[in-house]
Image: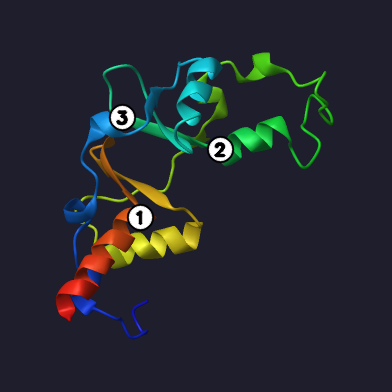
Amino acid sequence: MAKEKKLIPEFYEIPANDIMDKRIGNMPLIEKDASLECVLSILTGSDYVWVVESKGSKKLVGIITEHDILDIFSPRKEVPFFGFPSKKSLHYETFEKAGHLMSRNPIRCRPDEKVEDVLNKMIDHRVRRIPVVENGEIIGEITLHHLIRKFYTFLKNSN
């Protein structure tokens, strides 16, 4: 993005802290030891869930998305140890806890990172949301929707 013309240069300089959703209580969070049933119940209302170390902890250890679940239910290739799955052979006991399902070390940003850096991470890693992490703990998140809303506000105010 550095060499390309930016529509509203000030927008790209906004720190993540000014855009992120800080309402931790509203974010889908689950402990890594939570059951598959608990994970699936959260995913019925959200397309992802952040995984934290333990109850009461905000130490981010992973993310589970609908796509992760889809890959488990219907892998495109042979799964080592089990072979090709069928409805009768899928071994749910292998995926008993959130820690078994999660993608570890999700792409993250710091609260002082600029929108430009956050956007570049989203594009480079093909993700629509990034946790904002400070000292290893999740303190908020930035989604593509947050960025669209903020950019729309900038466009309205620049006219």
Q: Residues within 10 Å of mark 1 (few under 14, many from 20)?
A: few
Q: Earlier in the sequence, mark 2 or mark 3?
A: 3
Q: Of the residues shown, which amino acid type is indicated by label 1?
A: His
Q: Position of residue 63 (x, y in %)?
A: 46, 36
Query: Which mark is in front, 2 or 3?
Result: 2
Q: Of the residues shown, which amino acid type is indicated by label 2?
A: Glu
Query: Which mark is in front, 1 or 3?
Result: 1
Q: CA distance from mark 2 to mark 3?
A: 22 Å
Q: Residues within 10 Å of mark 3 (few under 14, many from 20)?
A: some
Left or right of 128 in this view: 108: left
Q: CA distance from mark 2 to mark 1?
A: 18 Å
Q: Is 120 above or below relative to 141?
A: below
Q: Position of residue 10 (x, y in %)?
A: 18, 74
Residue at x 84%, y 31% (from the top left corner): 84
Q: Residue 145 got which mark?
A: 1
In the rendered image, which residue does mark 3 sit on?
59
Residue at x 22%, y 54% (from the top left corner): 19
Q: CA distance from mark 1 to mark 3?
A: 24 Å
Q: Quadrant of the N terminus?
A: bottom left
Left or right of 151 in this view: 88: right
In the rendered image, which residue does mark 2 sit on?
66
Q: Of the residues shown, which amino acid type is indicated by label 3?
A: Lys
Left or right of 148 in this view: 69: right
Q: Position of residue 86 (x, y in %)?
A: 83, 26
Residue at x 77%, y 31% (from the top left corner): 80
